[in-house]
């Protein structure tokens, strides 16, 4: 839990620094930023439920509205903590992926639909390589 809070805090700092450089171009409108822009879980064992978060930042000067969240598969869910993000505000999107019964390379997509006039839809890939436990070096002891 502490590690997740630290990661969210770190993402917030990075986004704030990036956002400060784009304020002039975004006056009077929302501008979306996301960190990370890809959820890559790497190699994961079979029959595991994956969870992570995406941090959404409003780098513009008007309220950013998350109008909807869609995923490319019923096995993936993405839930924003808030649908409205004020100037320089952030919202966490909790992501859950059910990979039970899946094997090999796995790619799905999260689509954030917003009122950002330049980027109304942000697509975030969710990637994992689902392998046998033995492939991860977690061999059972007898």
Image (tube, rainbow, N blue to C red):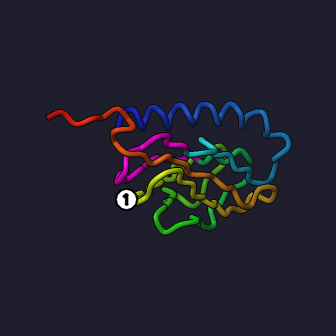
Residue 14 drawn above or below residue 42: above
Name the residue carrying label 1.
100
Q: Position of residue 140 (x, y in %)?
A: 22, 37
Q: Position of residue 127 (x, y in %)?
A: 55, 49
Bin the neighbour count of mark 1 within 10 Å (Cα to Cα): few under 14, some 14-19, many 20 and up: some
Q: In the image, is 117 to the left or to the right of 137?
A: right
Q: Main secondary structure of the magenta part?
A: strand
Residue 100 drawn above or below residue 16: below
Give the quadrant of residue 142: top left
Where's the N terminus, which quadrant? Answer: top left
Closer to the camera in the image, 44 or 51: 44
Magenta residues? 40-55
Q: Position of residue 78 (x, y in %)?
A: 50, 59
Q: Position of residue 133 (x, y in %)?
A: 34, 42
Q: Look at the image and say whether residue 51 sits in the magenta stretch.
A: yes
Q: In the image, is 86 to the left or to the right of 139?
A: right
Q: Look at the image and say whether residue 49 sits in the magenta stretch.
A: yes
Residue at 42 percent across and 57 percent down: it is 99
Residue at 39 percent across and 38 percent down: it is 135
Residue 139 drawn above or below residue 83: above
Closer to the camera in the image, 71 or 108: 108
Q: Residue furthest left?
A: 142
Residue at 63 percent across and 51 percent down: it is 86
């Amino acid at each position: 839990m502490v590690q997740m809070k630290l990661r969210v805090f770190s993402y917030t700092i990075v986004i704030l620094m990036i956002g400060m450089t784009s304020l002039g171009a975004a006056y009077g409108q929302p501008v979306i930023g996301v960190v990370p822009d890809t959820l890559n879980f790497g190699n994961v064992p079979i029959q595991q439920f994956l969870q992570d978060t995406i941090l959404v930042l409003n780098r513009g000067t008007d309220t950013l509205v998350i109008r909807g969240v869609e995923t490319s598969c019923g096995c993936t869910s993405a839930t924003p903590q808030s649908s409205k993000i004020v100037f320089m505000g952030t919202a966490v999107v909790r992501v859950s992926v059910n990979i039970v019964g899946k094997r090999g390379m796995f790619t799905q997509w999260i689509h954030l639909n917003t009122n950002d006039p330049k980027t109304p839809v942000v697509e975030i890939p969710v990637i994992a390589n689902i392998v046998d436990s033995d492939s991860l070096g977690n061999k059972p002891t007898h």
